[in-house]
Image (cartoon, rainbow, N blue to C red):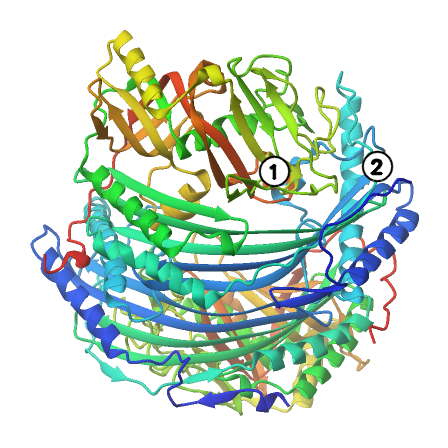
Amino acid sequence: MKKIIIVILFISTSFAIAQEFKYNKDEIFRAMKDEIDRSMKDLKLESLQKPYYIAYTLKLRKSSNIKSSLGSVIDSNSFVYASINVDLRVGNYKLDNSNFFDVGLGFFGSTDDEEVFKNRRIPYGLSYNSIRRELWLATDAAYKQNSEIYSKKLSVMQNRVLKDTTYDFLQVEPSVNYNIQDVPYFDMKQNAELVNTLSAIFKDYKDIYSSSVSIENVPEITFYFNSEGMKYINTDYYTGIEVGCFTQNNDGMPLGNFYSNYSVNPKDIPSLDSLKSAVNGTAQILTNTCKSEIIDEPYSGPVIFAGQAAAELIAQQFAPQLVAIRPIMSEGGVSTDNRNSIFQNKIGGRVLPEFLSLKALPTIKDYEGTNLLGYFQIDDDGLKSKDVEIVKNGFLKTLLSDRVPTRRVKQSAAHKRGGAPMYSTLQLFSEKSKELNDKQLEQKMLKLVKDRELPYGIIVKKIVNQNIMYTTLYRTSGGLFQIPRGDGKLAVAEAYKVYPNGKKELIRGAEINNLSVSLFKDILFTGKKSYALNLLAPSVISSYISGGDQYVGASIITPDLLFEDVEVKSIEGSFQKPPLMSNPLSKGE
Amino acid sequence: MIRKNVVFLSLLLSFSIANASDVLIKGLQDEMNRTMNLLKGEEIPPYYIAYNVTTLKKVNISSKNGSILSSASSKNRILDIDLRVGDYKFDNTHIIRGNPIQFNFAGGAIQLPSEDNIPAIQNIIWNNTDKRFRAAVERYKKAETNQKVKVSEEDNSPDFSKEEAIDYNGNVKDFDVNIPQWEAMLKRVSAKFLNFPWILSNNVFLQTEVQKKVFVNTEGSKMTWYETNARLFIIAETKADDGMSLPLYRSYFSFAPDGLPTEEQVSKEIDKMIELLNELRKAPMAETYSGPAILSGEAAGVFFHEIFGHRVEGHREKDPNSSQTFKKSVGKLIMPDFISIMFDPTRKLLNNTELSGYYEYDNEGVKAEKVLSVDKGVFKSFLMSRSPIEDFPHSNGHGRAQAGFNPVSRQSNLIVESTHQVSQDSLIKLLQLQIKEQNKEYGFYFAEVSGGFTFTNRTIPNAFNVTPLVVYKIFADGRPKELVRGVDLIGTPLTTFKNILATGDDRGIFNGICGAESGGVPVSASSPSLLISNIEVQKKQKSQAKPPILESPKLIDNN
């Protein structure tokens, strides 16, 4: 058996996350191995098969959050927790219980008071005895449920004509990898002062109804062991600052703006001056937006997506299509109905203009000084991360996969992240001939505007991030912020009309409409410089199905993008009227 | 010794929940007055506003199998707004008949800064008050039309009672929890379960809470008071060979952590639970049954809480969908004349046990009052919030709610008293006599219950369900009692009251959290044990999951 040992930073067998708790890795792995060994040997019910594969994932996580409004903390918590996931498979690599969704158990869970085996909360003291006890009960429940699912799957298959003979699970060479890093200390008091200082800035913006500034720090250590001999420890952490502010125009139109900065290390947080400037800028843009005009008629024409907007556009519309998704079978047959499945059969086809290429670069730690959230060393299956050329000269080469093969992707690209295949760092590369500086790009757009006899073109500078939309803006607004409904829509936080004479005018309450991935083939030119965006991206495969994370840290690196034709329109709806009373912050004015 | 672990303080502390509330009160009053002023010109202006601010300091520590599962302490502040448009007689809270959706949800807990940053607090209050005002006007108009299109109401009482304004500044109550010592203690006691592999789940946890309440309203009330509690829970669960899950619970309540049991007491209780669980998993299943039974004091307390208490919560008498069991019962005999029932939120202690249903003021800022609900079997009074009903025009301080919910009338400390008390031996003999008279082989003794639930709506049968954990068969021929499992106690209220024959000379006390439309509120129920001539039991829901296939892993010595 080939074993690769990677020791990135090894401190000792006894280690502490932010001095909150200690663990003994040998004790943890011993408990995992002992329980796997006896389960593989003895776990069997009557005529049912034994498991052919068992994997244990144990996570230790510390979550610290502070939220502040107008200079005072309104919520603060910090806690440690541990959980285990049991991946137990019955059958064989070719055909097992996986890739099958039991509608009853999947949606409602067992009615039989069964032990939990996905995200099972366990004591974080992590003694051998305690871990064994938890693994024993969780493995037992996983075996019983998955044996039942395996049998159901076989029954369903007997009644259906199925041509796809793709294996359910890939065999890989086991290895041992230790990525143990010291986790930087997160000072709650100091960070409370930071968010209070930043949130107090909004006191000066009387037109803003509500606002919040929050900081989150989540270090995590993962221990993994499976029956094939794969074993790893992985350290992962991030720190995020999120700023949200909300107001309404006189006609009731709900308007929000935000700022986010996700860093790998708390030390990477921008300086106080830089953050103050960002918060002031965010507040000022919202204040200005409130006083600006809407787009009277829906706009259809050339649009430049600049900086954050270009990265966010890729993150929301293009990147989710780059993940290999195995169609799930259920009692009702095989479902291929997934809005992120458009590229599953497009390998070899053109998905971007021929001057553009796109790579997944999980091995790149930073980009021009920005530490990337999409960087990782070991994926959830224990495989060493590797860069992947996904789109070459406009043509789709492959998709990002894990150990679950699909008809077109038969190997793992070592991209299991947060419990399912997921993108990491994606970088868009353009041919030099199509790269323009800011002014040239704008001129190209205005040329198109003139050709189409449009009064103006549009530059989008900020698109609302999906995570922030739900967790920050919607809450800060008390439910008034309008979340775009339906596919192909994006909420715009900052966009400008650009007139042929060069005049720029801020647009109020815009959303992008009818977007589709095929639109990316119509990118005409790109900017010269690239922008790196760290984001918490929604998992492409629902955490509900995978049992993993809802959001996964990712990075998008892209230049500005000029699209030939994009639809932008004003948000519509029966808005709630603005407050009847004046904001008490404006007392004395 | 745990008793030494915590310090109960009546003085102001630096990291204390207690701080000058004058600044906060003034900030709340200023915004309240500003709102009344700014909205007085509206078509339907507010006639009443109350701001209820609860500052909570919490500690939660949970332990399992000798390790800490979670340990967290927090401090936060929650705002509740009661804004009414119309007038006391008819306002936006008026019931809308015929609409199946009548949620009492107040819009969720509104978070405020924990410190007295008045501009920040006023900004949040303004934003939320504006939303509440608009919602109130919308609902008021709906209610107005609803009244016109429906038949005359049976109860024409006003929607809101007029109560005296109160100016009150209560004594500071606060405590700190020695978290490391509690963690160590909980780990030690929960480790006992590790030696018993057939105990599949266990949890020993501590929850403490210090609440500072600040209340102001447009009637002139201006109040500050404190509520504290500390609870210790032990949960352990095993499985019978037939798959039935068998849990046991122990809970302890005190107003401060130093009133909770010592480590030695907890340890002994865990030993007893382990022994009982071992017996339970081998105990035979009971069958469906109708006949005589005894309810222990604790079980009887829950029984009265479910079948009586929820039916005397006054606001239900106004609701045309409610069964209104006792609406026309005032002055009438509704149960044996040896039974009296009171609700006493002013009582802190009963038989040396602290009562969790104690409070000084309710969530509508009304002083808590003792209510004699049944006097020698005759029904006397409902529990009243500020929502009056026919013949009960005022609140008796029972308008209660969890933060984030609208208050309605809820129970406090339910205390059952009896003038027909017999010794425990005599009660058993009376039971055996009943069994013989009814030609049965056995009766039941319900020793422990986990809780229960009841339905008070007209659209479904008005049944109750009490969920026993420990039940014995008592045989008529004097055979030793037999532990059984797998039954729930069910019935309907009026029939069951009539069947109470006698009570014991003991008293059981159940401290718990009661959940209903205004959220979870702390309550207690205490009663002597009861002999009932006829009860019914039905089979309990049973898991079909087999016990674990493999034996529990062998423990290793960590030392």
Residue A478 visible: no
- For the point 88% across and 60% down, the residue is B551
Q: Is residue B368 left or right of residue A550?
A: left
Decide: few, some or many residues near mark 2? Use Cα within 10 Å; few <14, some 14-19, many ≥20: few
Crowding near the residue tagged with mark 1, few <14, some 14–19, many ≥20 C-alpha atoms within 10 Å: some
> B225 or B198: nearer the eye?
B225
Q: Nearer the viewer, mark 2 or mark 1?
A: 1
Residue B125: x %, y % from top left: 25, 60
Task: Look at the picture and state if B274 lies above or below B487.
Answer: below
Q: For the image shown, how many numbered marks are present on the structure?
A: 2
Q: Which residue bears the numbered disc 1?
A: A364
- The vertical placement of B24 against A114, above or below, is below
For mark 2, what is the residue? A173
Q: Secondary structure at mark 1?
A: loop
Quarter the N terminus of chain B occupies: bottom right
From the viewer's perspective, tell me whether residue A383 is left or right of residue A216.
right
Snapshot quadrant of residue B112: bottom left
Task: Locate residue B501: give its quadrant.
Answer: bottom right
* Amino acid under disc 2: Glu
The Cα atoms of the two marked residues, 2 and 1, are separated by: 24 Å
Q: Residue at x 49, y 64 (%)?
A: A77
Q: Residue flagged by tag 1: what amino acid is it?
A: Ile
Residue A163 in picture, x, y percent from top left: 76, 16
Relative image position of residue B132 (x, y in whole percent): 25, 54
